[in-house]
Image (spheres, rainbow, N blue to C red):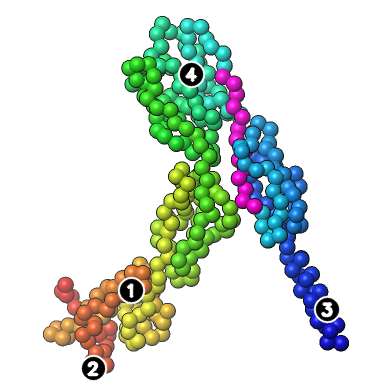
């Protein structure tokens, strides 16, 4: 009988372990579709991404298999817009264009001229170009500038502007490059919001939150930069415990008892005012103290007093009118 129970338990555990070894829905790729769309995938099951019409894949992997760990491999696929061929040359003229990618509206203008100062610059793959002219018209003269952009999610590496030089050439031509950042790490006393463990592309962001009663300071979002690193992450600032066991203080404009109303303390950045006594004038005044990342320092006038020695609590005394 005992052996039978062990066999049944072992079988149940084995079934539970096998049932858990599935993969959830794979990550979405912009401008791509998946050949098999399901909520759950079995271990060993393969999916394949296909770029939508008008878009082409980069060198990233298109097929992925559900791993025994229940995770998908890191996704490296990008679907980028196709580029239209350059229009033909115009005799005694020049073509200015802003963009020639799929699903963009091309801007073409043919201009006839006697002398061209600078020809249209060569564009890097998946680059976008706009012009800024000092003089009216579309001819590029000496000191005219052009502005480069890259089709998302590619990053522009180099100078985003170029200037027409006296020798008839442009000062510099940047590059459009695929940039990725590793899976972001968390923050102390906080956590990432709905972040998937995968590589992230340029300009993608993740957000952070803090644990209960901790205050988030700094940018809530961190961005994948063109360097392949994440931008500055926020920090979670600690709340302050009240440094006295018994006292009446001023908090948010109201009198509060430390021992009952402020048992949990106050949050980072908040201010509490302590009542101090002016013995000469028999009046009381308040000294504000701010909570700074778990640190709250009693004012000197309060530390030097013993509340138990006063027949009247300073918080009940008349306020000093001219105390500085």
The residue wearing badge 4 is: 96
The residue wearing badge 1 is: 295
3 and 1 marks in contact (CB < 8 Å): no
Magenta region, residue range: 73-86
The residue wearing badge 2 is: 309
Residue at figure coordinates x 40%, y 72% from the top left: 239
1 and 4 marks in contact (CB < 8 Å): no
Q: Report which quarter residue 300 is drawn in.
A: bottom left
The answer to which of marks 1 and 4 sits earlier in the sequence is 4
At mark 3, the secondary structure is: helix
Distance, label 4 to label 3, CA atoms, is: 77 Å
Q: In this view, does 179 lie to the left or right of 288?
A: right
Residue 169 image point, x, y percent: 39, 19
**Toward the viewer: 315 or 44?**
44
Mark 2 crowd level (few <14, some 14–19, many ≥20, 10 Å Cα): few
Residue 208 image point, x, y percent: 49, 59
Residue 317 image point, x, y percent: 24, 84
Mark 3 crowd level (few <14, some 14–19, many ≥20, 10 Å Cα): few
Distance, label 1 to label 4, CA atoms, is: 62 Å
The residue wearing badge 3 is: 8
Mark in the foreground, 1 or 2: 1
Mark 4 crowd level (few <14, some 14–19, many ≥20, 10 Å Cα): some
């Amino acid at each position: 009988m005992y052996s039978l129970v062990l066999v049944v338990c072992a079988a149940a555990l084995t079934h539970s372990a096998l049932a858990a070894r599935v993969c959830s829905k794979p990550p979405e790729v912009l401008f791509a579709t998946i050949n098999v769309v399901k909520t759950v995938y079995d271990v060993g099951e393969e999916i394949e991404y296909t770029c939508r019409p008008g878009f082409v894949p980069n060198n990233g992997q298109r097929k992925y298999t559900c791993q025994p760990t229940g995770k998908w491999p890191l996704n490296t696929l990008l679907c980028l817009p196709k580029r239209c061929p350059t229009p033909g040359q115009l005799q005694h003229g020049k073509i200015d264009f802003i963009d020639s990618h799929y699903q963009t509206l091309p801007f073409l203008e043919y201009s006839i001229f006697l002398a061209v100062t600078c020809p249209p610059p060569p564009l890097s793959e998946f680059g976008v170009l706009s012009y800024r002219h000092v003089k009216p018209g579309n001819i590029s003269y000496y000191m005219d500038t052009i502005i480069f952009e890259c089709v998302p999610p590619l990053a522009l590496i180099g100078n985003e502007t170029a200037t027409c030089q006296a020798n008839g050439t442009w000062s510099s031509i940047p590059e459009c490059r695929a940039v990725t950042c590793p899976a972001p790490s968390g923050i102390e006393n906080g956590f990432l919001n709905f972040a998937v463990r995968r590589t992230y592309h340029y300009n993608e962001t993740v957000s952070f939150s803090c644990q209960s009663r901790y205050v988030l300071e700094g940018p809530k979002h961190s961005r994948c930069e063109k360097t392949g690193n994440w931008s500055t992450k926020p920090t979670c600032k600690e709340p302050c415990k009240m440094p006295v066991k018994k006292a009446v203080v001023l908090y948010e404009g109201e009198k509060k008892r430390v021992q009952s109303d402020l048992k949990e303390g106050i949050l980072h950045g908040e201010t509490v005012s302590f009542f101090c006594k002016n013995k000469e004038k028999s009046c009381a005044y308040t000294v504000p103290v701010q909570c700074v990342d778990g640190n709250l320092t009693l004012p000197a006038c309060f530390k030097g007093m013993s509340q138990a020695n006063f027949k009247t609590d300073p918080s009940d005394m008349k306020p000093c009118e001219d105390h500085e």
